[in-house]
Amino acid sequence: MTPTLRAALWMIGSIASFSAMAVAGRELSGRYDTFEIMMYRSAFGVIVVLSIAGVSGAWRQINTRNLGLQLLRNMAHFIGQNLWFLAVTLIPLAQVFAMEFTSPLWVVVLSIFLLGERLTAMRALAALMGFIGILIVARPDIGNLNLGIIAATSCAVFFALTNVLTKRLTRTQGITTILFYLTTTQLVFGLLTAGYDGDIMPPDAASLPFLALVGGCGLLAHYCLTNALSLAPAMVVVPIDFVRLPVIAIIGMLLYAEALDVWVFIGAAVIFTGNYLNLWHETRNKAASAP
């Protein structure tokens, strides 16, 4: 199996985890604000990462190199994730994901300057087809611009920066180190932002499973994403995430009676086609260059 196909499989795990996290975030929104959700998510992540690292001995891999880059990456993710959770509470899930999926376009631009990756015609075509598919699904109307749409669109920029910086960190850092700093720094950010008013809502029996789901799925999503980015270029990995759009559209329809029409599937077909062409092209190139 080529590294590109292995990266695609890791992205399937990331897609499932992010989708489950969106549902859990929607369920928690009536009781917790976004800062509190992020705080509990990060606390759960710290426990899991330290437990696994302790049992496996991977804690020896944790080091203090690239602290500035780690801090910048995690700050970008913290801002983007809070905007994402805010958008999940305000607009339909499919629309949140559609606006978020402008992120690969930013990745294409940022990867050129921050990673030195080469923009090929096929990668550009895949990103463009993904964006066209998103427009078909979302059909954004400037006249209906609201806080939810602004939050979902803004989070895409910060997620793109997060993905690019993650790819850069994978050149010198292991996954354990990246996840350790992700959870610990964002726990600090979460405590500061959730506790600035001295009022943090404690978990109860009803919300605890959803808080655990947010924490577990958030960590698993980043584990899968980091593995994928370590195997293939960012401009190849990130467009695969477009598959989340039709998945979450169906989930939104089944759980929250959110409208679903034929345009979702037409847009999804365009998205799938772009991703397939990109994966086929990258796989063929890898096979041709193999000894």
Image (cartoon, grey):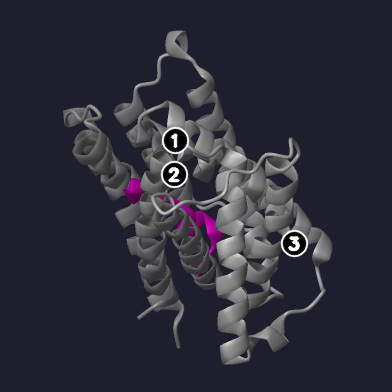
Q: Which mark is residue 88?
A: 1
User: Mark 1 near mark 2, Cβ–Cβ under 8 Å?
Assistant: yes
**13 above or below 211?**
below
Residue 106 in view, yes or no: no
Type of the residue with mark 2 = Gly
Q: What amino acid is found at the position of numbered circle 1 in the picture?
A: Val
Q: Which mark is residue 70?
A: 3
Q: Secondary structure at mark 2?
A: helix
* Residue shown at the point (42%, 51%) measured from the top left: 21
Kindly indicate the quadrant of the structure image that contains residue 176: bottom right
Q: Is residue 279 above or below residue 260?
A: below
The dot on residue 25 is 2
Evaluate whether residue 290 shows in this view: yes
Q: Nearer the viewer, mark 1 or mark 2?
A: 2
Residue that appears at 36% across and 45% down:
23
Task: Residue 33 in the image: state x and y as whole percent.
Answer: 56, 37
* In front: label 2 or label 3: 2
